[in-house]
Image (spheres, rainbow, N blue to C red):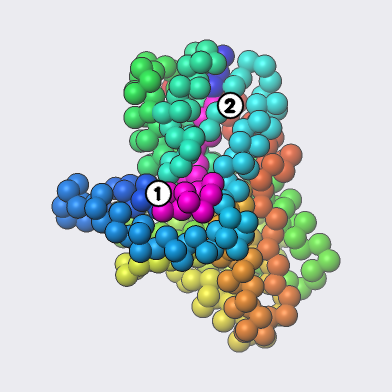
Amino acid sequence: MTGVVLCNMGGPDSLQAVRPFLENLFSDPEILRFPLSGILQRPLARWISRKRAPKVAERYRRIGGRSPIGEITRAQADALASALGPDWTVTVAMRYWHPRAREAAAELRCRGATRIVVLPLYPQYSRATTGSSLADLEAGLSAEGLDDLPRRVVRSWHDHPAYLDALAEAVAEGLRGFDGATVLFSAHSLPVKLIEQGDPYLEQVRATVAGVVERLGNPSHRLAFQSRTGPVRWLGPGVEETLAALAAEGLRRILVVPVSFVSDHIETLYEIDVEYVDLARTLGIREFRRCPALNTRPSFIQALARIARDAAQGPE
């Protein structure tokens, strides 16, 4: 039996879970790294989560009182299991909320997995996302006594043809009846310091965008970055200033494509669908749409199945 572990960041499943979710997030050394972080990070994470929880909880309240990412990832896992067939089992390991990595490892053991394919649901690799999830899963496997379980790890799949086909299909759907629209690819930002230290995320995001626009006949497009917080220098340009620039150029039809997310969660449902919609309206952009998330799109599930099969057949 081959087990597939879908790794994702997770999200609070209730308003009461927002604060502990944030504390888990800011306790991750890949999210906060500073001198003496080994001693100070946990109390700092508690302080930050306590300070930010009311504002973040209000955002979750606006999108239904919880993050849908857990349910969507579970649905992706179920659909992937059906696509792969009876010799496969698929489980989920969330980085900052349940089910956690150790829970996923225990599930693999109960299901009799004899080898695993680790498939993070981040198309582009970053130390802060994929790297952190992989390290967390290794700890979970070790805690469940599965250190010796053979495994193959997919570190990124940003340019896999089946994934690019699925994303291009979704963008084409968003552009249908939206003639003359500019496609604004939006990726989650990262501190520039990570890129300067060799993180391949930016290069891989650009490769994903190039692969999609090639499939669509090179429509007018831009790349910008969202979710920038804190005093560090972040990848840019930001979506906010890019929308302002597009409006200043007289462009009035914008299709936003979240290019580093494969499921709906707060960054799509609130940051894009609420904040950026309001900003676009203020800037005079009359028609502002978001490309549908991949979620359980059949072509995307088939892409994941191909990626998993390719990994299972490759070298350990």
The residue that disc 2 covers is: 90
Indicate the quadrant containing the N terminus: top left, top right, bottom left or bottom right.
top right
**Residue 208, horizontal then vertical, whole percent:** 57, 52
Between 44 and 153, the residue placed more toward the observer is 44
Q: What residue is shown at x 73% (from left), y 71% (from top)?
A: 181
**Residue 8, horizontal then vertical, whole percent:** 50, 42
Question: In the structure shown, which secondary structural element does the residue marked by tag 1 occupy?
Answer: helix
Q: Is residue 165 above or below residue 236?
A: above
Q: What residue is shown at x 76% (from left), y 73% (from top)?
A: 180
**Residue 118, horizontal then vertical, whole percent:** 49, 30
Marks 1/2 in contact by CB < 8 Å: the verdict is no
The residue that disc 1 covers is: 20
Q: Which label sits on residue 191?
A: none
Q: For mark 1, does the 10 Å Cα neighbourhood hold few (<14), some (14 to 19), or many (20 or more) residues?
A: some
Indicate whether residue 134 is drawn in magenta: no
Q: For mark 2, does the 10 Å Cα neighbourhood hold few (<14), some (14 to 19), or many (20 or more) residues?
A: many
Q: Is residue 149 left or right of residue 14?
A: left
Between 89 and 197, the residue placed more toward the observer is 89
Q: Earlier in the sequence, mark 1 or mark 2?
A: 1
Separation of residues labelled 1 and 2 (CA atoms) = 27 Å
Between 211 and 174, the residue placed more toward the observer is 174
Query: Which three-letter amino acid code belongs to the residue tagged 2?
Result: Val
Indicate the quadrant containing the C terminus: top left, top right, bottom left or bottom right.
top left
Q: How many marks?
A: 2
For the record, the magenta segment spans 4-21
Q: Is residue 124 left or right of residue 229?
A: right
Q: What residue is shown at x 70% (from left), y 55% (from top)?
A: 292
Q: Is residue 228 above or below residue 161?
A: below
